[in-house]
Amino acid sequence: MENEIHSQLSILNSQLFFTMNFPIDKLRSLPTPLYYYDVELLRRTAQAAKTEADRYGYHVHYALKANANAPLLRILSGMGIGADCVSGAEVQRAIDCGFAPQSIAFAGVGKRDDEINLGIDHGIFTFNCESEQELEVINELAKAKGKVAQVALRINPEVDAHTHAHITTGTAENKFGINLWQLNEVAKKATQMSHLKLISIHFHIGSQITEVEPFIELCKKVNELQAQLEKIGVTVEHVNVGGGLGVEYSNPDEHLIPDFAGYFSAINKNIQLRAGQKLHVELGRSIAAQCGALITKCLYVKELQKKNFVIVDAGFTDLIRPALYGAHHRIENLTSASTEKKSYDVVGPICESSDTFDKNIALPHTQRGDLLAIRTAGAYGEVMASQYNLRTLPKAYYSDKI
Ligand code: LLP
């Protein structure tokens, strides 16, 4: 019954229905392409996540990998959200932007010694460790400093997130985490290392998950694994179930704020926490995706016999998700006054045919100079930009400073 109710995690939150507004006149005066961030939407989204997590006393860590822009991070740290980092530079950025070191989880399958040392120096919340060798290295580095590092075991729970293969992380075929067959041995060793304190178990099954079942399956796995570890005398104060909650890419304005209520309630109903145990999540996309858009200008329109191309000044260097994952981002013409719709392929200027944002989409009649918004680009947009073709990285503009 429960599963039926939650069988589709509705990413619609109708009570908070509002649309994203673009300051078109101001955008017209700025060099394109550019990233535009609606900071009020970020605030509302993060507040919705926090409010729903607070209901159960859960801790939200924001995954900086989704978007690490300082003005956005300052908003999030100011709301009492923790951080989830995957590099030393992200740990430093989080600290510089006001996140408490004690709220920083540091994950990643390949942490360098200098990155580990940075975390030890700041006394971060946890190093989410992915192998026995990594535990040994952190133990040695902590010992050399006369400190004790807090660690989590990142466990590969073998739960299929049913998402894109490039962003599935929790199955046996993956490079991530400690495999189930090694878990008891590695956990025991971790508790015996003199300069480590094993305080948490950590999981992350994938990203852009829009159904609730994988999260329920994960919770059930966590319950089993906790019981398994307790049998060998290993207990932890914290359980971190990672990130992964998806967002609506097709009609962002209809579902601007993800269903955090459904997500946290599903966790709450299915996870069995021990007395005093604290639950953590690491949300990236669901917090940052909708507040950002890539704004680009139409350079040329090519009308061929079979196809029409809108050639814009943004390329996959500025938003790689369509080229890399075949992802669809809604594209809107912000300035066309036309009521006539036409079918277009929207492509960038880069010399590769994968530099295509979308194919055969209906847009109002589009002409040179029109401004287009490629929506839901706040997460994994700007952070994944490159300078291929010696292109300049676009600038970011914020709704409260524009
Ligand atoms: N925690 C860990 C350990 C992760 O690996 C990730 C994302 C997160 C948290 C945050 O997940 P989120 O809540 O954002 O789903 N570039 C890809 C997404 C890669 C996600 C990698 N890990 C994309 O554009 O779809």
Image (cartoon, rainbow, N blue to C red):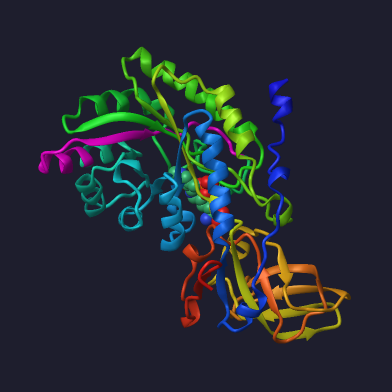
Q: Where 263 falls versus 284 (above or below)?
A: above
Q: Is residue 319 visible?
A: no
Residue 186 x %, y %: 31, 28
Residue 150 x %, y %: 26, 35
Q: Where 135 falls versus 307 (above or below)?
A: above
Q: Which quadrant would residue 212 be assigned to in this image? A: top right
Q: Residue at x 53, y 72 (%)?
A: 317
Q: Nearer the viewer, residue 308 or 89?
A: 89
Image quarter hosting the N terminus: top right
- Assess whether residue 154 is covered by the magenta stretch: yes
Residue 84 x %, y %: 40, 46
Image quarter hosting the C terminus: bottom right
Q: Nearer the viewer, residue 279 or 308?
A: 279
Q: Nearer the viewer, residue 164 or 79?
A: 79
Q: Nearer the viewer, residue 185 or 293?
A: 293
Drawn side of residue 288 relative to residue 77, left or right = right
Q: Is residue 233 visible?
A: yes
Q: Residue at x 59, y 56 (%)?
A: 41
Q: How many marks do you count on the picture?
A: 0
Q: Residue at x 17, y 41 (%)?
A: 142
For this orientation, the residue located farthest to the top is: 231
Q: Where 72 falls versus 194 (above or below)?
A: below
Q: Residue at x 64, y 73 (%)?
A: 23
- Assess whether residue 177 is covered by the magenta stretch: no
For this orientation, the residue located farthest to the right is: 340
Q: Which quadrant would residue 337 be assigned to in this image? A: bottom right
Q: Where 122 falls versus 221 (above or below)?
A: below
Drawn side of residue 389 relative to residue 333, left or right = left
Q: Which residues are magenta?
A: 138-161
Residue 192 x %, y %: 21, 25
